Image (spheres, rainbow, N blue to C red):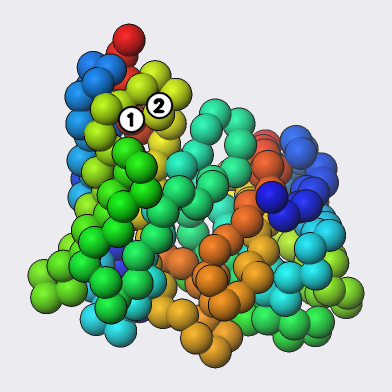
Amino acid sequence: GENVEQHPSTLSVQEGDSAVIKCTYSDSASNYFPWYKQELGKGPQLIIDIRSNVGEKKDQRIAVTLNKTAKHFSLHITETQPEDSAVYFCAASMLGGTSYGKLTFGQGTILTVHP
Amino acid sequence: DAGITQSPRHKVTETGTPVTLRCHQTENHRYMYWYRQDPGHGLRLIHYSYGVKDTDKGEVSDGYSVSRSKTEDFLLTLESATSSQTSVYFCATCGAPTGELFFGEGSRLTVL
């Protein structure tokens, strides 16, 4: 089955700095790579995703890059703000058939943004 | 946001007792899932459903069963709870084809 490794497990930055979280996956059949943000006491929420036919995607201060050959993808947050502090999860899956939502998650990264 | 309600939100039980967690959705999403979250493991899929009465196992299904008799409800049952099932359980739904999961707020289960 799919295996997703996520690094680092904790990340501490100053407000305004950039933050980068990296993930690798094992199954070359995976074609969907979402990132979820989880705030304390809440369920994870999708912040951005990318499909295997795209190399990069941006949404304001957030971007995701995908290298299919190397089987890794990364989350980039620019101009970090204290409200970006949360746990971030990467995930991988193969969309299609009964596979929708069968995500394999990374271990999570605790991001702390210091004012 | 998809309307997903989990109950109970917190439960403490003893080893060997049965436990049922309930997930109720109001979005008419076809796909529903149960994940558990443990430190160092992220979220792991327990069971999922791709329609009424259509369910299948996930990565960590041993000791769990599920049922889905209506589109809006998905039940997770621990027939005989063990301490290793102490965890936070999340229900999620998916309104394909985007693949986006919508999560409930979680149910924290402690097995003593």
* Quarter of the rendering occupied by the C terminus of chain B: top right
Seen as rendered, the residue at the extreme left is A70
Above or below, A57 against A43 in this view is below
- Amino acid type at mark 2: Ser
Is B93 or B61 nearer to us in this picture?
B93
Mark 1 highlights which residue?
A111
Q: Find residue B87 and report its horizontal and vertical position in percent.
A: 59, 44
Mark 2 highlights which residue?
A85
How crowded pointer 1 is (Cα within 10 Å; few <14, some 14-19, many 20+) is rated as many
Residue B111 vs residue A93: left or right?
right
Q: Find residue A113 and report its horizontal and vertical position in percent.
A: 32, 20
Q: Name the residue: 28% across, 38% down.
A: A77
Distance between the Cα atoms at labels 1 and 2?
5 Å
Residue A106 vs residue B74: left or right?
left
Q: Find residue B81 and report its horizontal and vertical position in percent.
A: 70, 53
Residue B18 visible? The answer is no
Residue A39 visible? The answer is yes
CB contact under 8 Å: marks 1 and 2: yes
Q: Name the residue: 76% across, 39% down.
A: B9
Q: Name the residue: 68% across, 42% down.
A: B105
